[in-house]
């Protein structure tokens, strides 16, 4: 290292950053689907790529979560882009437990919840109600960037064609029955 420090530092500084490359790819997938599938980006970073459905912003429950993201959205889809794995979730942000339960039961009754919630979180903690593992450590070890992107693309297209329409339908037909934060059912402040 002492003998070749400058060269090794240069190599390290310019090493490929797979996590960043996949974040750019995910943002491109989202941008391609924004108009066609009525999606709206929310928080975009290397680690989290978040979005929602545009029509959800018109529903009374959606913009009531100021302590989670700058948009204040309650329901967000989230690509979790870890350095060694990738997941895709539908999250309910910090809101009252009754609203979390209403959303979960709606999706469950429409057979679209893939994540079995066994323990309900506190109101100030986001709750995952839909979860897919997209890439595993083994995928990262055995696939190159192109193969990883193909796997992501395949899973994304399946989601858009199958799960998204079911989630969209369930929420559009049931959202008016959900319990919003009230004095009797407040959102707990973040700790």
Image (cartoon, rainbow, N blue to C red):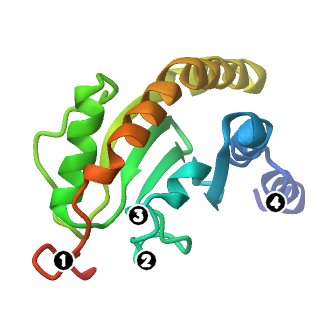
Does the rendering let one see residue 78?
yes
Q: Residues within 10 Å of mark 1 (few under 14, many from 20)?
A: some
Residue 110 pos. (x, y %): 30, 25
Q: Residues within 10 Å of mark 2 (few under 14, many from 20)?
A: some
Secondary structure under tag 2 reads: loop
Residue 14 pos. (x, y %): 85, 53
**Circle 3 sits on which residue?**
60
Secondary structure under tag 3 reads: loop
The residue nearer to you, when weighing 53 against 154, is: 53
Q: Earlier in the sequence, mark 1 or mark 3?
A: 3
Question: Which residue shows up at 36% across the image and 36% down it?
Answer: 130
Q: Is residue 65 above or below residue 129?
A: below
Quadrant showing the C terminus: bottom left
The residue nearer to you, when weighing 190 against 184, is: 184
Whether residues under marks 1 and 2 lie with C-beta atoms below 8 angstroms apart, the answer is no
**Circle 4 sits on which residue?**
9
Q: Earlier in the sequence, mark 4 or mark 1?
A: 4
Q: Residues within 10 Å of mark 4 (few under 14, many from 20)?
A: few
The residues bearing labels 1 and 2 have C-alpha atoms spaced at a distance of 13 Å
Q: Nearer the viewer, mark 4 or mark 1?
A: 1
Does the rendering let one see residue 135?
no
Q: Is residue 10 above or below residue 36?
A: below
Q: Earlier in the sequence, mark 3 or mark 4?
A: 4
Question: Which residue shows up at 28% across the image and 46% down it?
Answer: 103
Question: Which residue shows up at 40% across the image and 64% down it?
Answer: 60
**Circle 1 sits on which residue?**
186
**Circle 2 sits on which residue?**
66
Q: Earlier in the sequence, mark 2 or mark 4?
A: 4
The residue nearer to you, when weighing 100 against 179, is: 179
Q: Residues within 10 Å of mark 3 (few under 14, many from 20)?
A: few
The residues bearing labels 3 and 4 have C-alpha atoms spaced at a distance of 53 Å
């Amino acid at each position: 290292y002492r003998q070749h420090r400058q060269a090794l530092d240069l190599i390290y500084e310019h090493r490929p950053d797979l996590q960043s490359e996949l974040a750019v790819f995910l943002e491109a997938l989202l941008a391609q689907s924004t108009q066609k599938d009525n999606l709206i980006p929310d928080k975009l970073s290397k680690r989290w790529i978040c979005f929602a459905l545009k029509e959800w912003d018109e529903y009374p429950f959606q913009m009531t979560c100021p302590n989670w993201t700058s948009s204040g959205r309650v329901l967000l889809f989230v690509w979790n882009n870890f350095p060694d794995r990738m997941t895709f979730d539908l999250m309910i942000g910090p809101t009252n437990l009754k609203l979390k339960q209403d959303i979960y039961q709606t999706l469950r009754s429409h057979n679209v919840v893939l994540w079995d919630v066994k323990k309900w979180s506190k109101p100030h903690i986001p709750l995952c109600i839909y979860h897919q593992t997209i890439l595993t450590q083994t995928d990262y070890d055995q696939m190159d960037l192109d193969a990883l992107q193909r796997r992501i693309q395949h899973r994304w297209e399946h989601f858009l064609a199958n799960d998204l329409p079911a989630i969209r339908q369930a929420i559009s037909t049931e959202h008016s029955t959900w319990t919003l934060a009230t004095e009797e059912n407040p959102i707990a402040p973040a700790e």
